[in-house]
Amino acid sequence: MDQQCQPGADPDFAESDEALRRVYGESALFSRVGAFTLVHLDSPAEDEIARRVADFDPDEFFFDDCPLCMSAKAEGGHIVFDGPEREDPLRDGPAGEAFDAGLAELAAAAETFAEAVAFAAPADVAARYTEHVGGLHDRLVETLWSQESEERVEVFGRQFARALTTVEEVCHAVPELAPMAKPVEEALAGLATLWRGL
């Protein structure tokens, strides 16, 4: 289910169904669980609504300790069900597993090469390597989960190009590091091939 939380509800005040329908539309259905209103936009069957109500646990829904999550959990709000999530090949299934494995391979290769870069490359080149390649794993994961597949194509492209350019710059500055750069280049190429092929 695609679920979204709309925080800001007063736990002592439950909006009327009429007021909520003006916001969510005439076909919306509503269930209340404590300070939360479950908003069903996907026309679920009665048993599905009952399951959602029974399964809704704010402690599980707001599993992160971020301040926004903690505030929403404390204040209540609207939890919107608007239909099944579309499958994302990089997040689900065999391609997602391959992408995860490729990310792990990239992280390991980048970390191993970082030691040699820090020791042998000029400070400004080493700093760019740390930013563009060393931090790439985290940026790719953030992009993967914060953007839809169509939007992240351009972002991934820029991130991979910047990382490959930086590895080339390291190898140009310190040619003897070129053989040690191969695992990083191969991990980057493998990830790029995977996401371009979807």
Image (tube, rainbow, N blue to C red):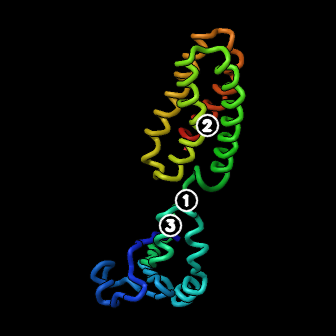
Residue type, numbered disc 1: Glu
On residue 87, which mark appears? 1
Image x and y of residue 74, in percent: 49, 76
Distance between the alpha carbons at the discs numbered 3 and 1? 25 Å
- Residue count near mark 3 (Cα–Cα under 10 Å), binned few <14, some 14–19, many ≥20: some
Q: CA distance from mark 3 to mark 2?
A: 32 Å
Of tags 3 and 2, which is closer to the observer? 3
Q: Nearer the viewer, mark 3 or mark 1?
A: 3
- In terms of sequence position, does the residue under pointer 1 or pointer 2 come before the other? 1
Residue holding disc 3: 69
Residue at 45% x, 77% y is: 75
Few, some or many residues within 10 Å of mark 2 (<14, 14–19, 20+)? many
**Residue 134 position (above or below residue 195):** above
Residue 4's place in the image compared with 169, above or below, is below
Q: Which callout, 3 or 1, points at the residue further toward the start of the chain?
A: 3
Q: Is residue 189 above or below residue 175?
A: below
In front of the other: 93 or 21: 21
Instruction: Classify 193 as above or below 53.
Output: above
Q: Amino acid at mark 3?
A: Cys
